[in-house]
Amino acid sequence: MKGGILCKKKEMTRLWIDDKMVPVTLLALEPQEVIRYKTDEKDGYNAVVVGTNKKTKNDKTSYGSVIEFAHDQAFADAFAQGATITSDILSDVASVTIKGVSKGKGFQGGMKRFNLSGGEQTHGSKFHRWIGSMGNRKPRRVQKGHPHAGHMGTDAITLHNVAVLDMVTHDNTSFLIVKGSIPGAYNSTLQVVIK
């Protein structure tokens, strides 16, 4: 089945798998439903629109997050418009693609941002954490491509072929257990794409 589901990133932990301690990440499945299907005739492409955290006020419906996924006919047959997407979609899936946004780290210097070595840390040195030489004398400007201090983090990251290890339920919440670390902060929304 080709489609997708939205999850919230929770904590990391470790599991014993084949006599090895494997780092894993817990992803909590959000209550979500199919808002509508986009079609070639009406929208120019095929997609399913999924929304989470549904709220209704004064006969108006809003969603906390709205994401589109590519899908196949098996997904459309299993989940009609208005249907709730459950964890059954991931029952026989061995690996998925996960899309998220990395943690924001603010304005950082060149040593942290680009792993520059800096200067000597000894007493009397006046060159500790500066970037250092920036190139030629001419042109009298810094050419593009040199590492500088600047904003770090909040990058869109896509991880392919992430292994799905298990699916557990605790306090009426389903958790997807995937191998390794996943981009994003605690409780950030992730797209889990099934291909």
Image (cartoon, grey):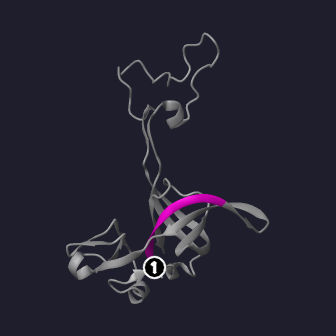
Q: Is residue 119 above or below residue 115?
A: above
Q: Is residue 103 magenta?
A: no
6 left or right, relative to 139: right
Residue 153, x across and y down, in percent: 45, 45
Residue 69, x across and y down, in percent: 38, 72
Residue 59, x across and y down, in percent: 20, 76
Q: Write down the quadrant of residue 3 in the picture.
A: bottom left
184 left or right, relative to 59: right
Of the pair 81 and 117, the residue shown nearer to us: 81
Of the pair 46 and 15, the residue shown nearer to us: 15
Magenta extent:
2-13
Determine the residue positioned at 63% across, 12% down. Answer: 123
Please identify the residue farthest to the top as the structure is shown. Answer: 124
**Three-letter residue code for mark 1:** Lys
On the image, numbered disc 1 is attached to which residue? 2
Label the magenta part by its dominant secondary structure.
Answer: strand
Q: Is residue 69 above or below residue 181?
A: below
